[in-house]
Amino acid sequence: MKIHKEGKEILLWTPVLLLLIYYGMHKKVVFNYRQSIGFTVVSGALYFWLIYFFRDPYRIIHTQDQYILGPADGKILSIQKVHEEEYLREDRIKVSIFMSPFNVHVNRFPMSGKIVFFRYHPGKYFVAFHPKASTHNERTSIVIENENGQKILFRQIAGFMARRIKFYFKEGEAVQQGEKCGFIKFGSRAEVYLPLDADMQVSVGDKVKGGITVLAKI
């Protein structure tokens, strides 16, 4: 199983940290056999979960210009009409995707085009499914414009456990649909703002895969 680059340093240092914790605790309290086994089991479970969290599965992306693909793995939390105030300044259909700590956390571009807007916003850390997470949490806003002049805004939003958002591209760069664009550590949310006339292909509660699931036809 391939490990994403964001997890390699953490996976390298986690065993060292766990050993230091064990010896630090052992100096204060002498563990018996069962306690030592229990600590080992919990530490092993934590480490294997980290490996699972930072997995980066291989995916075959079928680019489709008329479709918007999911930017992340997760569950459709809501689909609603909103007024996007940061850049587009018009009514849009907002699709919110909740990424649990058990989902793949690699983010991908929902369509091909050029990045015409990028902003990073520091913020709070409400749980990712909280309504205020969209406007109050740490987040990035990215707008892509395709060759037909259509613009899509999508956001990476940190959740309660997330403390770091990574985005690998800059404003002005050309990008490909389904291309890896970032990573959010430990539970988060992704949003896509679609035109009002978009033909929706998903419903609330659906499970989606980044770069695979078609959210809408535009």
Image: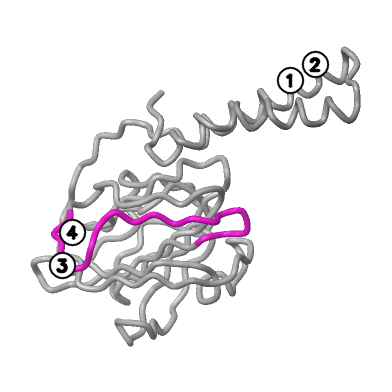
- Quadrant containing the N terminus is top left
Q: Which residue is mark 2?
A: 37
Residue 11, position in %: x, y? 51, 31
Secondary structure of the residue carrying numbered label 4:
loop
User: Which comes before the other along the chain, label 4 or label 2?
Assistant: 2
Q: Tag 3's secondary structure?
A: loop
Q: Amino acid at mark 4?
A: Gln
Residue in the picture at 25% in, 73% down: 117
Judged left or right of residue 64, residue 41 is right
10 Å crowding of disc 4: few (<14), some (14-19), many (20+): few
Mark before the other along the chain sequence, 3 or 1:
1
| Residue at image mark 3 | 172
Q: Percent x, y for residue 130?
A: 62, 67
The amino acid marked with disc number 1 is Thr
The residue at the point 17 percent across, 57 percent down is 112
Q: Is residue 77 left or right of residue 143?
A: right
Write down the residue under mark 1: 40
Q: Is residue 51 above or below residue 118?
A: above
**Residue at 34% in and 72% down:** 119
Q: CA distance from mark 4 to mark 2?
A: 55 Å
Q: Find disc 4 in the rendering and name its residue.
A: 66
Q: Is residue 68 above or below residue 91?
A: above
- Whole-number angstrom distance, CA of label 2 to CA of label 1: 5 Å
Label 1 SS = helix
Between label 3 and label 2, give the one nearer the viewer. Answer: 2
Instruction: Kindly give the residue lying farthest to the top in the view shown.
Output: 33
